[in-house]
Image (cartoon, rainbow, N blue to C red):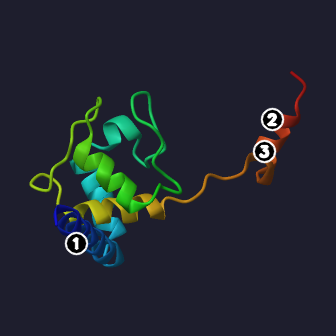
Amino acid sequence: MQTKTFVIVLAAAVTALSTAAQAASADHGKSLFIQKGCWECHGTQGQGAVTGPRLAPDPVPLEAISNFVRNSDGPMPPYRREILSDSDLADIYAYLQSVPQPVDPKATPLLQQWADKPK
């Protein structure tokens, strides 16, 4: 019986995350990313920094980020729902998804000239 209850609760949580992700706001997520201090370790665009890994572009699935954010036991403190709602987390995820891919140096003539110089 406990397994069935767990599966139902898990399905409800995934559905809630999926619903939140569909209605997410990248603009609000960007301000939350700054406001909640995520940028301090992950860089202003989630590009990674000295203490935090790269989150964007191409973040891992929302469910994986949510699980880590809620249950972190490493250097990053866990962000419980009382601190960061599922909706706010979905907005942060939408922001991370909105971060564009970096420019390919080979597509930028000035950078290509620099890269082609003998060392």
Residue 61 on image: x %, y %: 44, 60
- Say which mark, if any, is on residue 114: 2
Decide: few, some or many residues near mark 2? Use Cα within 10 Å; few <14, some 14-19, many ≥20: few
Query: Which badge, 1 or 2, is on the more N-terminal residue?
Result: 1
Decide: few, some or many residues near mark 1? Use Cα within 10 Å; few <14, some 14-19, many ≥20: few
Amino acid tagged 3: Leu
Cβ atoms under marks 2 and 3 closer than 8 Å? yes
Task: Identify the image quadrant of residue 111.
Answer: top right
Q: Is residue 70 above or below residue 53?
A: below
- Between 2 and 109, which is closer to the camera in this rendering? 2
Residue beneath disc 1 = 8
Label 1 element class = helix
- Say which mark, if any, is on residue 110: 3
Quadrant of the rendering where the N terminus is positioned? bottom left
Give the alpha-carbon distance from disc 2 to disc 3, as whole Å.
Answer: 6 Å
Residue 7 on image: x %, y %: 26, 67
Query: Which badge, 3 or 1, is on the more N-terminal residue?
Result: 1
Residue 71 on image: x %, y %: 24, 44
Task: Identify the image quadrant of residue 37.
Answer: top left
Could you tell me which residue is drawn at 35 percent across and 35 percent down? 41
Give the alpha-carbon distance from disc 1 to disc 2, as whole Å.
Answer: 57 Å
